[in-house]
Amino acid sequence: MIDVQLLRDQPDLVKRSQEARGNDPATVDAAVAADAARREALQRFETLRAEQNAKSKEIGKASKEERPALLASVQELAAQVKEAQAAAGDAEEAFAAAVMKIENIVLEGVPAGGEDDFVVLRHEGEKPEFDFEVRDHLELGELLGAIDMARGAKVSGTRFSFLRGIGAQLELAVMQLGLQKALSNGFVMLTPPTLVKPEVMRGTGFLGEHADEVYNLPADDLYLTGTSEVALAGYHSDEIVDVAEPLRYVGWSTCYRREAGSAGKDTRGIIRTHQFNKVEMFVYTDPAEAEAEHERLLGWQEEMMRALGLHYRVIDTAAGDLGSSAARKYDIEAWIPTQGTYRELTSTSNCTTFQARRLAVRARREGGKPAPVATLNGTIATTRWLVAVLETHQQADGSVVVPEALRPYLGGREVLRPEH
């Protein structure tokens, strides 16, 4: 949720942010009007209640003759107070609904526009070149006995797979490398629940326009998470925390996404599946430190890309392609040789105080009331990374050279060779 004071003081700034995202700026006018109505209704309720209390005190001091009229007046006021309280509650709900339609305020410098309007910040690493016909990750995975899509579909349907043998071990190696990178930079590991309550899912912004991507269990009133970010954001909900130093957590979990609206996209292999594993960094920090922390998260992700020997680019995502909670998002896209293009492997988002306001995560401010903290997130390993690793490091015979950084997690193995 955005800062209500900002909405009151700078509605034009909020409108510009909505417009940059491609959203209707009329939502801002509606929220401003709802806020005014809410304040007016609350003021009327409080005025009537104060009048009722004052009249009630008069009854004890009144004469026998005056008392009946005062009692009648107090009873009439009581009815008005009850009515005003209900009206104030309705106005509060109307305002909450209106302000929830406003997404986080994009930071200065974020490119305007949609999915194709990103800005490339830099290219890193050597683009792989081959003197043989390259195989895609699925063909390599099948040769290595590492990926079994057919049996995944047999057991669970489309967009499911089995990672098998060295494939499962390779995924685990990538996860371990990412986890160690996070731990070495002061993160505390959490194994989070992958089922969360609606208020936590809503608080992180995942029940907005992308709600159809989320698996819901109505009988239990729970949601399956598509990222550890959700549970990690809820970890300190309704708490006052100390962010003199950033609170850094890293969650390792299985993730689930319905991939609604992606029919026909990336149906081959493990690029876009309903279930995958991920290691996710999550940070609570002082809002003044959020942008610097965002750069640190990006830096750790880039260290992972270099350790895996991948060619990649970093993009500054356009406002219209941001999630509702993100004020800025950097994506790292790796080069996929068989596709001749870059594909997103990881992203990191600065959510400023948007999620913390919704989830009531606050920190004490010197000389002032507790105020919302800033939250940030960033993936440091996921199953999809196997696509880039396999394709980038393949050899003519279908074998794959193991990046040196992964070898300690694979018993020192240097090359993955076809089963037959």
Image: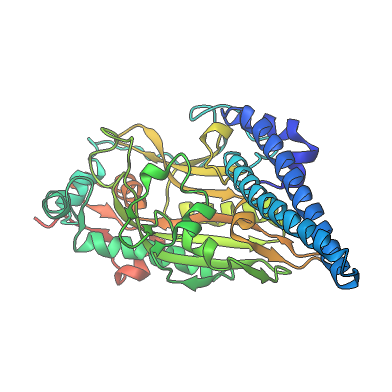
Task: Locate residue 297, reporting x and y percent.
Answer: 58, 55
The answer to which of 315 and 321 lies nearer the viewer is: 321
Q: Residue at x 68, y 60 (%)?
A: 373
Q: Quadrant of the C terminus?
A: bottom left
Q: How is the image coloured?
A: rainbow
Q: Is residue 27 above or below residue 45?
A: above
Answer whether residue 368 is visible to the viewer in this image. Answer: no
Residue at far left of view:
420
Q: Is the residue 267 above or below the residue 279 in the image? A: above
Residue 143 on image: x %, y %: 15, 50
335, above or below 304, in the image: above
Tell me: 245 left or right of 203. right
Task: Residue 198 in the image: state x and y as whole percent.
Answer: 45, 57
Q: Tell me where residue 174 appears, x and y as whole percent.
A: 37, 61
Residue 262, by quadrant, is top left
Please tell me in which quadrant of the rendered image residue 318 appears: top right
Q: Which residue is pictured at 65% across the width and 47% down the height?
A: 87
Furthest residue toward front: 65
In this rendering, would 405 be left or right of 391? right
In the image shown, does 98 or 18 lie closer to the viewer?
98
Q: Is residue 158 visible?
A: yes
